[in-house]
Image: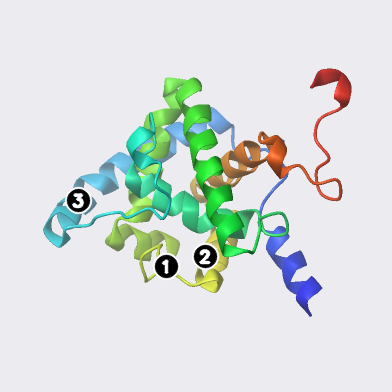
Amino acid sequence: MKQKKITERTAIHPSVGGATDDPSRRSFIKLGLISTGVLSGAGMIAGLTGCSATPSTQTTAQLKLLRPQDVVILESLAPIVLAGSFPSDPQLQSDALQRLIEKTDDFLFRSSPFNHQGLADLFDLLYMPATRIALAGVWNSWEKASDSSKEQFLRSWRDSRFGLFRTGYTQITQLLAICWYKDPLNWNSQIYPGPPKHIV
């Protein structure tokens, strides 16, 4: 039974080299434009409700690009996206999350500025209560959301008939997968033994 659950979870995330059905750049531009329109209204709601993010890791003060709300979402989804390779021990998980957030921040900081605003808009949509419930179907905050609700969110966006949701899903899952396996501490001979020695 335990093995079956792991299999179902690992099926949520794509391979690191996967691609969306739509041209990536065009879909991401559309996602950003739609996000801007939705956020103009959602931002007013967030201001009235006083949304605040409290990441579990203590690295946000030294991050170059990721905001507290971005970190909360990534911390919440990482154990689901990386199921099967993510540690279950609380202390090991905390250390792994901290390293992952730092590497994700550095990876994004070094990437094209084109990606920065699009991801920021995507995280805003997923963090604000009104849009989180309407678009992701997650009723509780990410810090309190159950694993099953997060798994359902990922599956619904992965299998959505709307290319924009599939693009958002791919951006999140591939970002986490790439940054996780960039860290040699996460290389496991049974899952990912690391790159060939001649290119390390």
Q: Which residue is mark 1?
A: 138
Which corner quadrant of the image does residue 32 belong to? top left
Residue at the far bottom: name it.
Answer: 1
Q: Nearer the viewer, residue 84 or 48?
A: 84
Q: Disc 1, disc 2: CB below 8 Å?
A: yes
- Of the two numbered discs 3 and 2 on the same chain, state the one appearing first in sequence: 3
**Amino acid type, residue under disc 2 in the picture:** Lys
Q: Disc 1 and disc 2: Cα gap in Å?
A: 7 Å
Q: Residue at x 15, y 52 (%)?
A: 44
Q: Residue at x 50, y 45 (%)?
A: 98
Closer to the eye: label 3 or 2: 2
The answer to whether 155 appears left or right of 85 in the picture is left
Q: Disc 1, disc 3: CB below 8 Å?
A: no
Q: Residues within 10 Å of mark 2 (few under 14, many from 20)?
A: some
Q: Is residue 197 placed above or below 163 in the rendered structure? A: above
Q: Which residue is mark 2?
A: 150
Q: Disc 1 and disc 3: Cα gap in Å?
A: 19 Å
Dot 1: element: loop
Q: Which mark is residue 41?
A: 3
Q: Nearer the viewer, residue 58 or 159?
A: 58
Which corner quadrant of the image does residue 89 belong to? bottom right
Question: Where is residue 119 shown, x and y percent of the image?
Answer: 42, 38
**Amino acid type, residue under disc 3 in the picture:** Gly
Q: Disc 3 and disc 2: Cα gap in Å?
A: 25 Å
Q: Tag count in the figure?
A: 3
Q: Residues within 10 Å of mark 1 (few under 14, many from 20)?
A: many
Question: For the C terminus, which image quadrant?
Answer: top right
Question: Where is residue 195 shown, x and y percent of the image?
Answer: 81, 30
- Of the two numbered discs 1 and 2 on the same chain, state the one appearing first in sequence: 1
